[in-house]
């Protein structure tokens, strides 16, 4: 609830409504000039046709007595009837075309808005911003509209176009009343209609503000429904008998959402409804009194009386809800507000960061451009992507491998939170394999996030071949990386797509695909797929196949190796074998370290025993380097690494013999 005084709200609310309509008017041209012109003309015509029907029906009524009194005087009656009928039929024929043009305009605007939302969310939004609740609420409402859970910005455009017919009809009715009765009657009719209209829209707008304030509750309800109705949690829900719990929790959350919503609806809408009903009654009574006097004195012809009576009814019905316009314009613009607020927040956070990779796209997808690549070229670095020429193999990448340094790096997820990385100094040598090990919470995954520039250091810097990463375009830097995260994505796409997404620029490279599959040990999986590499990796599609956890992990590894084949210079694997058994894990690392000789690679692991062959092992503890060296050096040191290595080895094989320590 707002704490601002009533006088302040009385000024700010109309101002906000005017501002929202100005934004909507600026959004209209996104539908296209030709389509917009055709839709405007069509809606004006649809607004005028009911008035034509009123006029010609009134003419028909006026001519009936004369036709009955004069033999052969029915020609004028039939002409008026045909014209009235023509106006009615033409309106019915044009109504579907009105809906078609509105739908096309909706699709065009929504297409641009979806592009802008995806571009901002996937490219220009700092990861830290996407982890905050207020941002997730905005994104939920913006994304919910395009999931058709709410009206979209395109719906708002379509609704605004449809309003043209309504206001054309109102203006025409006011003119008819003013001409047939009196200018005062026309003015009173129009004023009453506008008071009813703006009062009704104002109440709906206040209810919309209440609805928007409850975005967080809607997001929680959507999560519960998505979890209970999805396939990922189905097995655990059934085994643990959680169905009743989810049903009860959903009922509880819905009550917590609907009770204040209904209470607010009654509070916001009940009073204005009574007031507006009285205004409509007073205005309608006044106009009818202005009509009754001349009619009683015989000063009005039957034609004038019929036109005035029918025309008066149009404005008097103007305070009702318009199903083709009201929800669409109000809630469609609310989703657009969420989209623009999300985009603006991303722009502000990027502007506050000196190394911002580029301005976010506009909500309509316009101007989503990446700045020119003016960043320094890293020493020995080849261009990324298809323009890089033949993809280097394991034996010829050393000349362009990257050397990385963390220099006195401090990182906190929140300004007042604990330091996850605490004055970290670390060198990742070019062309060599570096294994980073440590217990959970040591800062291993956070280190990867900084290396990939999903976050920026709170203090200190990260450099590549001596160049501060903050001086580089984020997009250009990430093209030099091949990364697999511990929680990697499982795309419901073909195996070929799952692998080649590692370097999506340009056409897929069959040679690089084959090499990546071989490196990841996926040949046996590929051989069993019914459609080969074009098999969709999901049972939810015809001929689709689901993979085991270990097979999915190899697929993600192949995606990273494909990026290497296409020119990536730094390979980062965050817990790459978490879903493999111990034997498969050892085999993988032996194979991996052999095939990536000469390439700068970083392997994050909490299992000490599987990274023994790495060129260099770094032990992280409490956000700092506790020890570093080769396996032999660290075990001989008898420190933290040797202790944890021995403890983990004993879990699988009993006490470690002295000679193996």
Image (cartoon, rainbow, N blue to C red):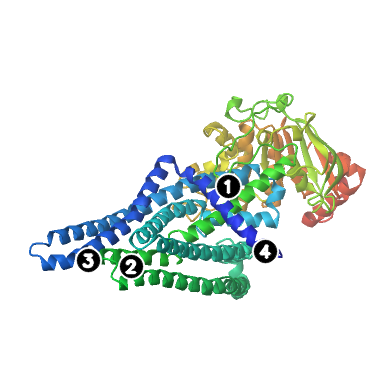
Q: Earlier in the sequence, mark 3 or mark 1?
A: 3
Please give the label number shown on residue 7.
4
Q: Report if the CB atoms under discs 2 and 1 are less than 8 Å apart.
A: no
Q: Position of residue 501 (x, y in %)?
A: 57, 40
Q: Position of residue 78 (x, y in %)?
A: 16, 60
SS at badge 4: helix
Q: Is residue 440 above or below residue 433?
A: below
Q: CA distance from mark 4 to mark 2?
A: 40 Å
Q: CA distance from mark 2 to mark 3?
A: 13 Å
Q: Nearer the viewer, residue 493 or 658?
A: 493
Q: CA distance from mark 2 to mark 1?
A: 50 Å
* Residue labelled with disc 2: 309
Quarter-of-image position of residue 253: bottom right
Q: Is residue 245 left or right of residue 331?
A: right
SS at badge 1: helix
Q: CA distance from mark 4 to mark 1?
A: 36 Å
Q: Measuring 49% from the left and 55% from the top, which residue is drawn there?
A: 539
Quarter-of-image position of residue 481: top right
Q: Earlier in the sequence, mark 4 or mark 1?
A: 4
Q: Earlier in the sequence, mark 4 or mark 3?
A: 4
Q: Report if the CB atoms under discs 2 and 3 are less than 8 Å apart.
A: no
Q: Is residue 215 left or right of residue 198?
A: right
* Residue labelled with disc 1: 117
Q: CA distance from mark 4 to mark 3?
A: 52 Å
Q: CA distance from mark 3 to mark 1?
A: 57 Å
Q: Report if the CB atoms under discs 4 and 2 are less than 8 Å apart.
A: no
């Amino acid at each position: 609830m707002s704490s601002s005084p009533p006088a302040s709200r009385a000024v700010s609310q109309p101002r906000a409504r005017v501002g929202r309509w100005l934004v909507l008017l600026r959004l209209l041209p996104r539908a296209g000039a030709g389509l917009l012109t055709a839709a405007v003309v069509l809606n004006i015509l649809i607004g005028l046709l009911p008035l034509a029907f009123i006029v010609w029906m009134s003419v028909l009524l006026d001519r009936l007595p004369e036709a009955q009194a004069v033999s052969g005087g029915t020609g004028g009656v039939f002409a008026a009837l045909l014209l009235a009928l023509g106006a009615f039929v033409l309106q019915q024929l044009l109504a579907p075309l009105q809906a078609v043009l509105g739908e096309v305009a909706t699709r065009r605007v929504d297409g641009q808005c979806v592009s802008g939302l995806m571009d901002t969310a996937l490219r220009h939004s700092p990861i830290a911003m996407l982890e905050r609740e207020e941002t997730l609420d905005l994104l939920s409402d913006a994304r919910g509209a395009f999931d058709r859970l709410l009206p979209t910005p395109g719906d708002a455009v379509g609704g605004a176009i449809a309003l043209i017919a309504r206001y054309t009809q109102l203006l025409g009715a006011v003119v008819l009343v003013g001409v047939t009765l009196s200018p005062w009657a026309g003015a009173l009719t129009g004023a009453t209609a506008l008071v009813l209209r703006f009062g009704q829209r104002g109440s709906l707008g206040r209810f919309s503000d209440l609805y928007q304030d409850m975005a967080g509750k809607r997001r929680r309800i959507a999560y519960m429904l998505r979890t209970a109705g999805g396939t990922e949690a189905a097995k655990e829900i059934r085994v643990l008998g959680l169905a009743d719990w989810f049903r009860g929790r959903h009922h509880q959350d819905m009550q917590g959402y609907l009770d204040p919503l209904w209470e607010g609806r009654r509070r916001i809408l009940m009073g204005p409804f009574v007031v507006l009903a009285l205004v409509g009654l007073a205005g309608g009574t006044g106009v009818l009194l202005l009509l009754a006097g001349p009619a009683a004195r015989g000063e009005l012809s039957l034609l004038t009386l019929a036109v005035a009576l029918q025309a008066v009814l149009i404005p008097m019905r103007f305070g009702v809800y318009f199903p083709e316009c009201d929800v669409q314009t109000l809630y469609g613009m609310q989703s657009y507000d969420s989209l623009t607020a999300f985009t603006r927040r991303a722009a502000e956070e990027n502007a506050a960061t000196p190394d911002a990779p580029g301005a976010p796209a506009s909500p309509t997808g316009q101007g989503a451009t990446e700045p020119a690549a003016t960043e320094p070229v890293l020493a020995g670095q080849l261009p990324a992507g298809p323009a890089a020429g033949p993809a280097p193999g394991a034996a010829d990448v050393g000349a362009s491998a990257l050397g990385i340094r963390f220099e006195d790096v401090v990182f906190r997820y929140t300004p007042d939170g604990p330091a996850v990385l605490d004055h970290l100094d670390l060198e990742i040598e070019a062309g060599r394999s570096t294994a980073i090990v440590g217990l959970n919470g040591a800062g291993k995954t956070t280190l990867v996030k900084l290396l990939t520039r999903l976050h920026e250091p709170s203090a200190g810097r990260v450099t590549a071949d001596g160049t501060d990463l903050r001086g580089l375009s984020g997009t250009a830097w990430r093209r030099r990386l091949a990364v697999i995260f511990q929680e990697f994505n499982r795309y419901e796409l073909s195996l070929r797509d799952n692998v080649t997404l590692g370097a999506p620029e340009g056409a897929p490279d069959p040679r690089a695909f084959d090499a990546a599959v071989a490196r990841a040990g996926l040949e046996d999986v590929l051989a069993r797929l019914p459609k080969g590499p074009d098999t969709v990796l999901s049972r939810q599609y015809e001929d689709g196949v689901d993979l085991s956890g270990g097979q999915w992990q190899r697929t993600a590894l192949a995606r990273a190796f494909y990026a290497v084949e296409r020119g990536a210079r730094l390979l980062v694997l965050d817990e790459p074998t978490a879903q493999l058994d111990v034997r498969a894990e050892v085999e993988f690392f032996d194979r991996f370290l052999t095939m990536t000789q000469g390439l700068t690679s970083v392997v994050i692991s909490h299992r000490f025993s599987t990274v023994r062959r790495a060129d260099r092992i770094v032990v992280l503890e409490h956000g700092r380097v506790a020890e570093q060296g080769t396996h032999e050096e660290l075990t001989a040191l008898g420190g933290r690494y040797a202790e944890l290595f021995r403890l983990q080895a004993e879990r699988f094989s009993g006490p470690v013999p002295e000679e193996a320590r």
